[in-house]
Amino acid sequence: MGKRATSANAGKGATHRVSKSTASRVLTYAPPWAAWIIVLPLSAVAYVTWGRNPTAAPWMSMAAFALVAALVPFTWRVLRPRDEVLQWMGTVSAGLGGFWFIVGMLVGPLTRGVIDAWGFGGFGICVFWTIRRMVVNGAAEQHAEPQESPLVKALNGARVQTAKAIDGRVVGELEVNRGSQTVKDLQGARETIEAALPDGVRPGALRIAKHPTDAGRATYAIVPTDPLAGEIPWPGPSAPGASIADAPIPIGMYEDGTVASVYLCGDDSIGRALAHWLIMGMNGSGKSQAWVMAMADALTRYDFELRASDHIKATQTFGPLLRYMTKVAFSLKDAKALINEVRDEAAERFADFGKRGIKQWEKGCGYPLTIVWVEEAPDVVSDSAAFTKLVEQVRSAGFVVVVSMQLAKHDRIDTTARAQLAAAVCFGVRDAQDATYALPDTVLDAGAAPDNWGNRKPGYAYLVAPGVDEEMWPVPLRTFRARDPQIVAVLGEWATPVREIESPATSLVSSSLEGDVVDPDDTEDEDGMEPIPPTLEPDMQIDPDQPISPPSADANLAFGGGSNGPKLSTEQARAVVQQHLRTLAEQGQTHTQPANVCQMKPATTRSREWVRQELNRLCEQAGPGEVALERDVADMPGVYRIVAPSLAGV
């Protein structure tokens, strides 16, 4: 019953629309016919009122004649802009109609001859007008502009200037409706334009960016299908053995197929500043795995150092990097201590740089570029004045702070500190508002929408950083995927371990206990703290009745468990270094590499810093009979050339 009623109503509606359309078309032909009919009764009224009155007739006839005499040239003038046929038809119709009205008023419209002229003459004129109207309507329908498409409506006056297809993308330029529209208006209508595209595209397929030289134009790109679908394997280290300043670190691929890279250090020669980093994305978006891969690449460079903290997931985050990390903190206390330690070291570097006229960290400055990676950052940085001072002060000393967190809201990181994080990698977020904490408004306006991914597409990200072309900021990328075995193999070949990790349990010892930086002449214990006993493996057989004592404060933990014997004196440690260098020389080696330095560290029962300072001493003031070393400005940091035993003082 309801369906029949609905069908009947629909039929009535369609009939009504057809009737309305027909009536509208008929009315376009009505004016000349209506004028023809109306002139007869008007003439009859004029005849009865004035024509039969001998006094009024002469005056009214003269007035009517004057009116017609003025109407004819006026009609000709008004119709001049139109075509010539219409001009003649309108003028003749006005003249004949006016003349007939005067005659009808004087002798009566029903008089034989007058009524005949009205009938035949008026009918003929109306036919002419009808034919003309039919011709005009037909031409109008033939040349009528097509109805605006949804896309034209969505553009709201903007015009597509150029368009070309490149590798599955459509790129080109738009010109705004100048004077009533801006590029920002187009960017605000981006989703409407996407929905209006005839073939249908995925959300986020359209990007609109400002033109670099014309405020009235915009560049656009339409990527109908997702070119980043599917995992992108990590190709391995980009420049192993080189300086961190020699080449950027590739982290993934943009959707146009170009490589996305990050610059961890500045370059005064081209005006690129060193920047702190914000790594943001919701849980499961792939941010930690991507940064682990990037740090693995960086660790293959000879002048790079990694320090980090993670008080939540501990070794789970850093995994294969742990043996190569100079400092690691696994508690909030140690994380904050790490921040304070970096600030103190930065002050020392500033003093040294100032003496040598170095404005910011640069290749060959004598210090490694140091990444301070704060994972699960909110608990560490949300209410930390020390952290705010850290990011404000240490940048030019060669310390790069990397903050990794799910959401960089003001209640999770101080806004002053966040303002110092000039570089960002934004992975998928929950909603559009979350993206504003990591990406600039210009990037979001241009079409960046990490909320389209959430954590459903791990590794998808936007990269905003110094050294990266600003046109690429709103372009999505996908980070490389590296498995732990691949990272372990790469680091084992190219990187220098700074700790020994025997098992995941023993790796939980914070390197804040290592005391790597000590006075080279200090013969006291390096650590000065009681170490934390590692968690025992489940399969270890332990007598429950036998008490277990933690290691004493004299135990050496500088190399993840190194020597268990007594600490050597300075003279004994130097003798170990000399024996090591003589062995290398006897084997025909002319250089000592960073890996050899690490081998000397446990043998001397001293820190890596002590070994480094001892090697520098041998470069500058080797004693008589000692194997001396040389360095050249072209040598990589940590690499020394072995020379004959010194004859100094002989």
Image: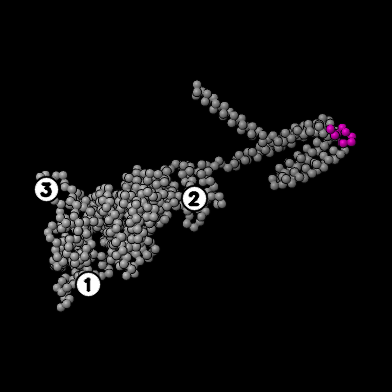
- What is the secondary structure assignment of the residue under circle 2? helix
In terms of depth relative to the viewer, which is nearer, 417 or 225?
A: 417
Mark sitting on residue 620: 1
Residue 609 x/y as whole percent: 22, 63
User: In the displayed structure, does residue 479 sit left or right of residue 606?
Assistant: right
Sequence-earlier tag: 2 or 1: 2
Mark sitting on residue 184: 2
At 14% from the left and 63% from the top, the residue drawn is 568
- The magenta-colored residue range is 49-57
- Residue type at numbered disc 3: Pro
Sequence-earlier tag: 3 or 2: 2
Mark 1 in CB contact with mark 3 (< 8 angstroms): no
Residue 30 x/y as whole percent: 69, 34
* Few, some or many residues within 10 Å of mark 3 (<14, 14–19, 20+): few
Colour logic: one colour
What's the distance in space between the residues labelled 3 and 2, CA to CA? 73 Å
Q: Residue furthest top?
A: 1
In terms of depth relative to the viewer, which is nearer, 141 or 452?
A: 452
Can you tell which of label 1 and label 3 is closer to the viewer? 3
What's the distance in space between the residues labelled 1 and 3, CA to CA? 51 Å
- Residue type at numbered disc 2: Lys
At 24% from the left and 57% from the top, the residue drawn is 326
User: Do we see residue 211 in this rendering?
Assistant: yes
In terms of depth relative to the viewer, which is nearer, 42 or 76?
A: 42
Mark sitting on residue 67: none
Residue marked by disc 3? 547
At 50% from the left and 23% from the top, the residue drawn is 2
